[in-house]
Amino acid sequence: MSWEFETDPEYQEKLDWAKNLVEQEIYPLETLDLDYDTFVEAARPLQEQVREKGLWAAHLPPELGGGGYGQVKLGLLHEIVGRSPLAPVVFGNNAPDSGNAELIAVATEQTGRTDQRERWLHPLLEGRLRSGFSMTEPGTAGSDPTLLETSAVRDGDVWVINGHKWFTTNGSIADFLIVMAVTDPSAGPYDRCSMIVVPADAPGVNIVRDVPTMEHPHISEGNFWGHTEIVYENVRVPAGNLLGNEGSGFRLAQARLGPGRIHHAMRWLGQAQRAFDMMCERAVSRRSHGSLLSEKQMIQAFVADSLAEMTAARLLTLYAAWKMDQEGPVTARVEIGMIKYYGAAVLYNVIDRAIQVHGGLGFSSDMPLERMYRAARSARIYDGADEVHKASVAKRVLRAYKAAEVPTEYIPKRREAAKQKFADLLSEATADD
Ligand SMILES: Cc1cc2nc3c(=O)[nH]c(=O)nc-3n(C[C@H](O)[C@H](O)[C@H](O)COP(=O)(O)OP(=O)(O)OC[C@H]3O[C@@H](n4cnc5c(N)ncnc54)[C@H](O)[C@@H]3O)c2cc1C
């Protein structure tokens, strides 16, 4: 029996080192609004340090240069990395490249296509190529990918792709795009789609725009973290660009999203903790109506509720990670679903309270909170809207229950059964009277 909440000292030392790097070296870069190329130049020596510490792209299997740490340890690292939106680039796990690298790793493991590793995976891991994941379409509900319409039709040795996508993160700066397309319309709903690698400069890849969002309302074209609208018009790519087996698109997407959600949830916690620290510091610093904010019960409730919610989200996420390590992603589906919607709500609530405690300062761009708040709103939508995860968790849980004409706990029925079970005892008690 083991039931522990401890990190081994050797790994804790790595985590402490990572936290120090994020706070001392990466936080200052946030304030400079560097363009991506200048930021990458500033990040390069830090990336070297991360490599030397054995924490670079730690989510990957050891044969690809990862740490082989397992999801619990990775989760603890992501909690630290999540404190700064820039840190994932320094630690080699920025979206969508990290998820796409995992995807190619899983797909090539299934097919043995080492040529695809050479061509796309290794350059991606070394930061020589950038990628996008092109699945969501403006015309169909992203929540129900069985509705996808983008098609890939085989014409001799090539796939011909036609479709309209949007929200392809980094699509306008990517070197290649992983496109989810229907390759067999007559197959079952979860066997219709495949993933195909499309070089971004292939004729017919039409970048329409980076969609302005709450996070980047004034984004100009071709920026890092842009969410790109793309029309694929008779794009022809070699048949060998298929990832995994034909029809395996959904299974590959699941393999990509499971661990990714744990990393997201832990990164959200790192951000929530940063907002929490700002809230507490302000509460003990600002006076109003004769006392510090920290002495007002309503502000104390903000602090107490936030801490309880963050602790609950943290334990839930680490439990999901532990379950994944023990039994694999399939058995941890309910836990992974829960952390998605619970973690997103905690992030949003804590940042919201931190803004409130700062008053006008919190609403201003003089603090990082307003940016964090705008970014946090999307956590309830991407990687599956909260409602879809809630419905899926509830459906799985409800499967274990059977309908009962009379509720199992109906007291009159239970009382009758108890009277029979304890008849001797009851008759003795009556006799004693
Ligand atoms: C910041 C960000 C980054 C993204 N990055 C990428 C990317 O790199 N690649 C990519 O392909 N996509 C990406 N997306 C798209 C994202 O995956 C989709 O937005 C998401 O899957 C929801 O799909 P949708 O927008 O079509 O909403 P819809 O499916 O139209 O859903 C709209 C709303 O309907 C409700 N709803 C839907 N289904 C149900 C249901 N079954 N029960 C109850 N309510 C329901 C929910 O409230 C949901 O929010 C990104 C999105 C964001 C915001």
Image (spheres, grey):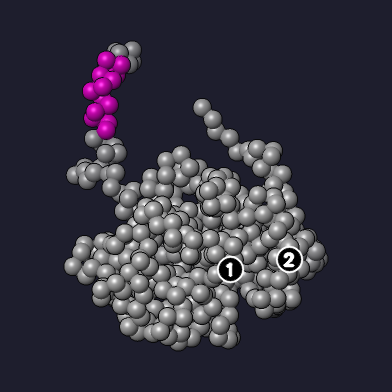
Where is residue 47 shown, x and y percent of the image?
Answer: 68, 60
Which amino acid type is marked by label 1? Answer: Arg
Where is residue 114 shown, x and y percent of the image?
Answer: 44, 56
Q: How many C-alpha atoms fall within 10 Å of the one at disc 1: few (<14), some, or many (≥20)?
A: few
Magenta stretch: dominant secondary structure: helix
Give SS at disc 2. Answer: helix
Q: Image point 72% across, 56% down: which residue?
A: 49
Instruction: Kindly identify which residue carries mark 2.
Output: 27
Please provide the residue range marked out in magenta: 414-427
Relative to residue 247, is residue 206 drawn left or right? right
Where is residue 8 shown, x and y percent of the image?
Answer: 65, 37
Where is residue 205 shown, x and y percent of the image?
Answer: 41, 82
Q: Image point 35% across, 59% down: which residue?
A: 244
Query: Is residue 304 among the parts visible in the rendering?
Result: no
Instruction: Kindly identify which residue carries mark 1.
Output: 128
- Where 19 falls versus 387 (above or below)? above
Relative to residue 10, is residue 3 drawn left or right? left
